[in-house]
Image (cartoon, rainbow, N blue to C red):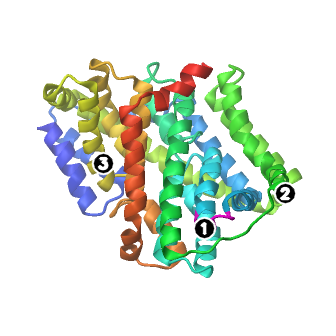
Amino acid sequence: MSAAILIGGFFLLIMLAFPIAFAMGLSTMAAIAIHDTLPMTLLAQRALVGAESYALLAIPFFILAGNLMNGGGLTQQIVRLAMAMVGRFKGGLALTSVLAAMIFSGLSGSAAADASALGKVLIPTMKRQGYGGGFAAALMAAACVNGPIIPPSIPLVIYGLSVGKGAPIIDLFLGGVVPGLLLGIALMIAAYIISVKRNYPTTERVPLREIPTYIKNAAWGLLMPVIILSGVVGGIVTVTESATIAVLYAAFVGFFIYKELTLKAIWPILVQTALDTALVMFIIALSAGFGWLLAVSGLPKQLGLWIASMSNDPLVILMLINVLLLIVGIFMEPLPALLILIPVLVPVVSAVGIDLVHFGLVMVFNLCIGLITPPVGILLYICAKFANVKLEEESRELTPFLIASLVVLLIITIFPSTVLWLPRTLL
């Protein structure tokens, strides 16, 4: 009965347009209220337990590092580098948008941050050069899905903390590199084909001999993900410590290298970071009680047994889970979906021998596709605002990029080596 109240109440509140965190908190309260032995203080207690983790400090620091890099002029340097590399091709600015998003993904860890930073620069520029507004918005939204895939990644941190030793965060970070590159390449191929058909212009033919200059100008930003990964892989720092180093590095580059970061700009950056962090932590805290009640109800075990009864083949299990996650991603953002579904699905995949690092990337990649599927896809709304187009116009242009994303999801699902090769090679 408590599971029915919990799940039913949650989806009812979602349909009534309640924020995800409040939907989880209120449905948890309702389930506790009808239970004879559970005190209402359980909600507060589980919320404190869920938020009380040293490793979670990595989240605000990665958010702050991304905001500092954005405010410090790195966005412009990355765009210039990407344009110098691919602007010579048909649809050069479209290709630049995808490549810039791939590079920026290694700095922020957040799809929404990437879309906000790059979208306000590149989408209006594409429109001025003759690209359709819907196309520009759809392409930018799809490209920014890479934000949580290429490390550092806030959803991968959450997954790693939830699963524990079976999926170390550094393994997940390294495992996201190849899928992120594959997604970027797939989107660039789709954008190029469309650009040729519609005769979109080339942007800038930078002589090859000048590209090293652009790389040099953007090198300080490009070094940040290298510093993060090499420090953790080498055992020098933990993931949380690497996030603090990223903040110091971002501040140094913004103040002293690009000199676009000012003391006056620090306060708005800190406020925005606090708001972003509060949103994430509020969801994490209220999901803890929701997840605990769900586990106690026995529903995850029953669902796991049902999925397992369908087949013993790991690939079939993964395909079934992929279908489930794609449906969930239409209605929920990745973070709350992860927190709710990890306790349900991890025992199932563990039972059939699926590597938890591989599954983590498949799960995060799948749910991040939901960021570009109506009606909840937040990236669609961010990019539509910058393009000044309606969601319907943007959604019509989204199909080829959605297909490209699903093809990459299929590849990383069928071939675990696309995820596991790099961590097994370097660790």
Instruction: Compute the Cα span from label 3 to label 1.
Output: 33 Å
Image mark for residue 326: 3
- Find disc 1 in the rendering and name its residue: 90
207 or 50: which is nearer to us? Answer: 207
266 or 159: which is nearer to us? Answer: 159
181 or 46: which is nearer to us? Answer: 181
Instruction: Compute the Cα span from label 2 to label 3.
Output: 43 Å
Label 2 SS: helix
The C terminus lies in which quarter of the figure? top right
Q: How far from the left and from the top, in percent, is residue 392?
A: 36, 75
Q: Main secondary structure of the magenta part?
A: loop
Would you place residue 265 above or below residue 254 in this image?
Answer: below
- Earlier residue among tags 3 and 1: 1
* Neighbour tally class for label 1: few under 14, some 14-19, many 20 plus, Cα within 10 Å: many
- Find disc 2 in the rendering and name its residue: 210
Q: What residue is at 54 percent from the left and 37 percent from the top?
A: 178
What range of the chain is rendered magenta?
A: 87-94
- Earlier residue among tags 2 and 1: 1
Marks 3, 1: nearer the viewer: 1
Label 1 SS: loop
Question: Does 312 sit left or right of 357 as displayed?
Answer: left
Image mark for residue 360: none
